[in-house]
Amino acid sequence: MADDIERNEGERQEEAELDPEEEIGKKVSGKKYKAALEELEKAKADAAHWKNEYYKAYADTQNLRRSLEAEQRTMYRYRAEGFLDGLLPALDAFHMALDAPAPTKEAANYQIGFTYIYNQLIQALSAEGLSELTPKVGDPFDSDYMNAIEAVESEEVENNHVLKVHSKGYKLHDRLIRAAMVTVAKKPKPQEPKEEEAKEPTKETPAEEEKAPAEA
C-alpha cells in the first residue's frame, strides 16, 4: 500500500516537471480539436454580443442623462410659471387702479404709492424672466401674443388693427403665459341705399284745369 502511494506521488511529480511546450506540441484528436474550435467561436460570439450590449447600455445611459439634464434646465428656467398664473389677477388689479383717473388729491397720492410698489414687483418678476406684452391702439393684430375678444366696426382704426386693449399679456422667457386681450377693428358695412320715398302726385296747373272741361 505504501509502495502504491509513493509510486503515485512520483508520477505526479514527473507530470509537474514536464515542459509546457512539450504539452503544446502534442497532437490531439480531431474530435477534441473540433470541440475546442467550437468553444473558441462561441467565446468570440459571446464577447461580441456582450460588447454590443455594453455599447447599447452606455448609449441609453448617455441619452437618459442628457434628457434628464435638459428637463432639469427647462424646469429651472420656467419654475415661476405656476406662481405667475396666480399672480396675474393681482397685476390686472394694479393696472386698473393705476389707469383710473384719481378723483381726489388723496387718491392721486395713493396711486403714486401703488406705482412704486408695482414697479418693484415688475422688477422682481423681470429678474425671473417675465416680460410684459403691451399692444397699443392702432397696432396690427398679432395672433402670436394677442387674443381678440371681439371685433367692432370702426372708421378711425384700420381693419384688423387694435381698437382697444383690455389687459396686458405676459411672457416667461420665450414661453407665452397669457395673451393680451384686445378688441380689433373691422371695416364698417356699406350702407344700403335708402328706398326712394313715394313721390307725391303733382298738382295740375290752372291751364290744364281749364282744358279738362273742354275736352270733356
Image (tube, rainbow, N blue to C red):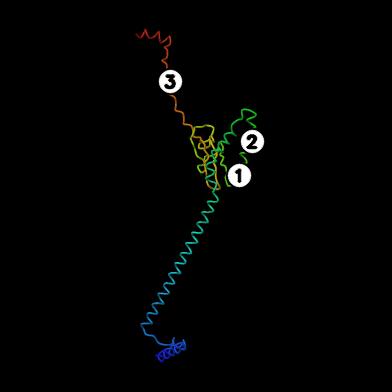
Residue at 37% in and 9% down: 212
Disc number placed over residue 3 in the picture, else none: none
Q: For the C terminus, which image quadrant?
A: top left
Please tell me how crowded label 2 is: few (under 14), some (14-19), or many (20+) other residues with Cα within 10 Å.
few
**Residue 170 sits in which quadrant?**
top right
For numbered disc 2, what is the local secondary structure? helix
Q: Residue furthest front?
A: 1
- Pick the residue in front: 118 or 5: 5
Q: Is residue 128 left or right of residue 208?
A: right
Disc number placed over residue 113 in the picture, else none: 2
Check whether the beta carbons of the residues at disc 3 and disc 1 lie within 8 A of each other.
Answer: no
Residue 86 pos. (x, y %): 53, 41
Q: For the N terminus, which image quadrant?
A: bottom left
| CA distance for labels 3 and 2 | 63 Å
- Which residue is under mark 1? 124
Disc number placed over residue 197 in the picture, else none: 3
Total labels: the figure holds 3
Compared to 207, does 12 lie above or below?
A: below
Residue 214 pos. (x, y %): 37, 7
